[in-house]
Image: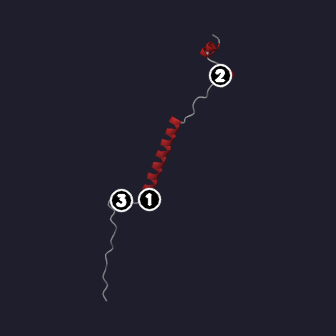
Amino acid sequence: MSRFALPRIQPARNGAPPRPLRRLTLELFGVIALKIAALTLIWWVVFAPQPKPDASAAAIAERLAPTKSALQELHP
């Protein structure tokens, strides 16, 4: 019986990164960071806290008071 010597075949590394999992992880973290930044920007533009309205008694009385035109219609 003769033994044939098989040459060891090395996989070709034509520019392939040595650790593709690390690159994938970094890309995923980048995408997640961009999404969080985009959602934060959308929230800030659309749902940002607006200034609180004047809730003093005088302001409420002014809003609830009848208008001048309504008073003129009641008292001709």
Q: Which residue is mark 2?
A: 64
Task: Classify mark 3: helix, strand or loop.
Answer: loop
The secondary structure type at the circle numbered 2 is helix
Question: What residue does disc 3 label?
Answer: 16
Q: Is residue 68 above or below residue 6?
A: above
Q: Is residue 64 above or below residue 17?
A: above
Q: Position of residue 50 (x, y in %)?
A: 57, 31
Say what amino acid the circle numbered 1 marks: Leu
Q: Are marks 1 and 2 in contact (CB under 8 Å)?
A: no
User: Rounded to the nearest whole Å, what is the CA distance between mark 2 and mark 3?
Assistant: 73 Å
Q: Quadrant of residue 18?
A: bottom left
Vertical relation: 22 (above or below) 52: below
Q: Residues within 10 Å of mark 1 (few under 14, many from 20)?
A: few
Q: Earlier in the sequence, mark 1 or mark 2?
A: 1
Tell which of 28 and 10 is nearer to you.
28
Residue 66, picture quadrant: top right
Name, please, the residue furthest toward the bottom. Answer: 1
Residue in the image at 48% along x and 42% along y: 38
